Image (spheres, rainbow, N blue to C red):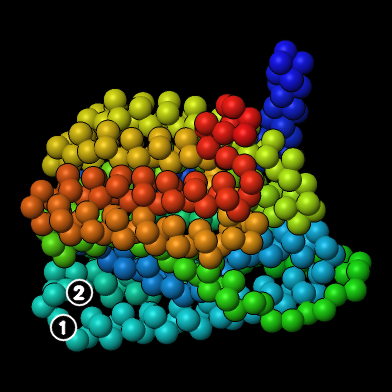
């Protein structure tokens, strides 16, 4: 047992100093900086808009994010695997055709959805009367938000973690934070439509930078080094990636939408700091996954299952410990953090503990979603996440009309527990090992 323990320790040290660990550390730095900038920008905006105005802007942004995900058609997630797989096989022309097809499809679909939202605003429905002024500028951000995510996925597939992140994660929130600060210092007033117009302009800058990075990568690609047959991407698999992306964004935005529709815009606004703090809790998992996901595709394609298990074990143990520390730290400091948004928001501090519990459970289950999607089991992952979304929405419909933001927090955590439990059962069956913290500790 001692020899086996020493062997595992040496393997863990080797993995911890390998390319995934180095890329993950870079990703952590970028993501922390980006989330800090986003937090500053949104806190300043919330102070200027107030809880009600911030809720209106957040509702419109939730609609825009969902539409952008619909417009992506799953290409952003699929690009991570397809670029890595085709690059490893030397299928450069096939890779180029995949990228061209993805860009054209996303541009067309996002333009259509932008027009659809503008038409919805023109209908002047009573159901969205409080949000119509904010929805119009948000509609124009849809193609930009979609393009940012597509360029991110393509760049991530090439293994360029930092280049994938910084246009959307650093440049965009930095410009937004500067704009909010200038408005405050100059004594300007801010309304939701104005805020969303500024937000759209920052997204335009990020798209320009992301597009430049992608074009430069493709210009530097060497010709194909092996014969290849270029064909259409499998529609069924693409549909699975699309479904996963859509379910993910619906899960991220459902609480804001339900609070806006079944409670008040003010309660939707008060819940937004919780929404902004949740990504901080997921930093360890998401940052490590930036390089882990394409690496899974490479190892699975090469039949290196033992290596995949070893990498996953280190991922789960490391990210679980870090998530526990980060989530508990944020929950403890909650009242002081929320004070940055204004006095109206401090009452939401107890909700952080509920959401933190869900994120810790998510980390303890391991990178099950990434493992399934990158090993050709995206459809099974989709079914599990749909189950989690249904649980979250059902809980929200039950609790939000009566207890508002507290009900939203319970709904978010219920969805996380259900979808991770289902994913874990499926992952053990499909992959042949337990990627959770239990499996990592007992080496199963």
Q: Which structural element holds mark 2? A: helix
Residue reaching furthest to the left: 402
Q: Going 60% across and 65% down the picture, which residue do you hit?
A: 78
Q: Going 49% across and 46% down the picture, which residue do you hit?
A: 424
Residue 225 rendering spot, x and y as whole percentages: 91, 67
Q: How many marks?
A: 2
Q: Going 17% across and 73% down the picture, which residue do you hit?
A: 128
The answer to whether 310 is drawn above or below residue 221 in the figure is: above
Label placed on residue 133: none
Label placed on residue 132: 2
Instruction: Give the quarter of the figure containing the C terminus.
Output: top right
Residue bearing the label numbered 1: 124
The answer to whether 144 is drawn above or below residue 22 in the figure is: below
Looking at marks 2 and 1 on the same chain, the residue that comes earlier in the sequence is marked by 1
Residue 1 rendering spot, x and y as whole percentages: 71, 15
Q: Quadrant of residue 315?
A: top right
- Camera-nearest residue between 17 and 443: 443
Report whether residue 96 is seen: yes
């Amino acid at each position: 047992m001692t020899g086996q323990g020493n062997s595992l320790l040496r393997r863990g040290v080797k993995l911890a100093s390998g390319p995934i660990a180095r890329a993950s550390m870079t990703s952590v730095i970028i993501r922390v900086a980006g989330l800090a900038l986003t937090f500053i920008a949104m806190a300043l905006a919330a102070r200027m808009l107030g809880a009600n105005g911030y809720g209106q802007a957040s509702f419109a942004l939730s609609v825009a994010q969902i539409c952008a995900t619909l417009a992506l058609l799953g290409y952003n997630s699929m690009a991570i695997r397809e670029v890595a797989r085709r690059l490893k096989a030397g299928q450069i022309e096939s890779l180029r055709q995949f990228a061209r097809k993805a860009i054209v499809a996303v541009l067309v679909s996002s333009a259509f959805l932008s027009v659809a939202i503008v038409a919805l605003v023109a209908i002047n429905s009573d159901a969205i009367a409080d949000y119509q002024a904010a929805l119009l500028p948000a509609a124009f951000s849809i193609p930009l938000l979609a393009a940012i995510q597509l360029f991110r996925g393509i760049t991530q597939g090439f293994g360029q973690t930092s280049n994938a992140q910084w246009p959307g994660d650093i440049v965009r929130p930095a410009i937004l934070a500067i704009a909010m600060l200038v408005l405050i210092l100059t004594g300007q007033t801010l309304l939701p439509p104005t805020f969303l117009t500024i937000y759209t302009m920052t997204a335009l800058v990020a798209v320009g930078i992301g597009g430049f990075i992608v074009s430069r990568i493709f210009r530097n690609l060497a010709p194909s080094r092996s014969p290849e047959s270029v064909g259409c991407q499998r529609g069924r698999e693409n549909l699975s990636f699309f479904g996963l992306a859509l379910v993910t964004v619906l899960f991220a935005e459902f609480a804001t939408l339900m609070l806006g529709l079944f409670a008040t815009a003010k309660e939707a606004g008060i819940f937004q700091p919780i929404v902004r703090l949740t990504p901080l809790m997921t930093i360890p998992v998401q940052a490590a996954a930036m390089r882990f996901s394409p690496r899974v595709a490479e190892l699975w394609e090469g039949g290196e299952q033992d290596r995949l298990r070893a990498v996953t074990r280190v991922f789960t143990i490391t990210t679980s410990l870090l998530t526990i520390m980060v989530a508990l730290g944020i929950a403890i400091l909650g009242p002081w953090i929320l004070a940055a948004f204004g006095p109206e928001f401090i009452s939401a501090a107890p909700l952080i503990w509920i959401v933190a519990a869900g994120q810790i459970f998510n980390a303890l289950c391991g990178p099950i979603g990434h493992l399934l999607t990158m090993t050709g089991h995206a459809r099974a992952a989709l079914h599990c996440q749909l189950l989690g979304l249904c649980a979250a929405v059902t809980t929200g419909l039950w609790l939000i009309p009566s207890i508002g933001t507290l009900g939203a927090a319970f709904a978010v955590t219920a969805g996380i527990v259900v979808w991770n439990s289902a994913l874990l059962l499926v992952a053990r069956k499909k992959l042949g090992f337990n990627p959770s913290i239990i499996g990592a500790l007992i080496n199963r």
